[in-house]
Image: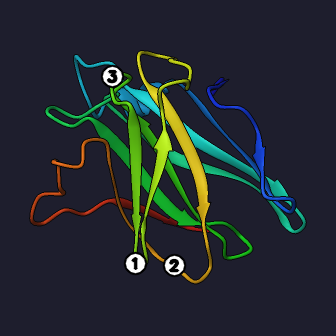
Amino acid sequence: MDLTPVTDRRTDGRLTWWVEAGPAEEIMAALHPGRDVLMTDIQIAGPGVNEGWGFGGPPLEDGKRVEFMYGRAQDGTEFVIARFDPTLPALHLETTRRVITVDARRLPVHFGLKFWAQPIPADEEFVTAYGDPSESPPLGWAPQRHDG
């Protein structure tokens, strides 16, 4: 599967990560007949870590403005990966201790969306991601999770 880098490479001094995206392979597209299907992967590299994982499906599910997945890299670092409506001025990542606000105004648009990924500090746990503070996850909300 040929994916295109859609974010700059970022680093915390130990790990380096970036997001890649592109049209899904036929097997994923078959799960969503008649709809565009987009793969979104995070690539993570560093000491003891060289991996990629992500999710696929319609670019944004009906009525949603943010799609995301979270999981742990091989070294235990928790990461969040998101794709979202390009009209949103910010992406909000809620953890057990705070809300991290990402200024999205200058992020590039690829495949009609904006993309972001980042690690979550070890003393926090990821809770949810959203674009508009007035939007909250619905009851029964169940994000996709990856355990490396």
Residue 57's disc number: none
| Near-viewer residue (111 or 134) | 134
Q: Amino acid at mark 1?
A: Thr
Mark 2 neighbour density, 10 Å: few (under 14) some (14–19) many (20 or more): few
Q: Secondary structure at mark 1?
A: loop
Q: Earlier in the sequence, mark 1 or mark 3?
A: 3
Q: Are marks 3 and 2 in contact (CB under 8 Å)?
A: no
Which residue was labeled with disc 3?
87
| Near-viewer residue (5 or 133) | 133
**Is residue 98 depicted above or below 23 in this figure?**
below
Mark 3 neighbour density, 10 Å: few (under 14) some (14–19) many (20 or more): few
Q: Amino acid at mark 2?
A: Glu
Compared across the picture, whether 57 is left or right of 62 comes to right
Q: Are marks 1 and 3 in contact (CB under 8 Å)?
A: no
Label 3 to label 2: alpha-carbon separation: 29 Å
Mark 1 neighbour density, 10 Å: few (under 14) some (14–19) many (20 or more): few
| Residue 145 lies in quadrant | bottom left
Which residue was labeled with disc 2?
124
Q: Are marks 2 and 1 in contact (CB under 8 Å)?
A: yes
* Percent x, y of residue 104: 48, 32
* Percent x, y of residue 80: 51, 56
**Is residue 87 depicted above or below 145 in this figure?**
above
Residue furthest bottom as drawn? 123
Q: Earlier in the sequence, mark 3 or mark 2?
A: 3
**Is residue 114 depicted above or below 125 in this figure?**
above
Which quarter shows the C terminus? bottom right
For the point 43% across and 77% down, the residue is 97
Q: Amino acid at mark 3?
A: Thr
How is the model colour-coded? rainbow
Label 2 to label 1: alpha-carbon separation: 6 Å
Which residue was labeled with disc 1?
96
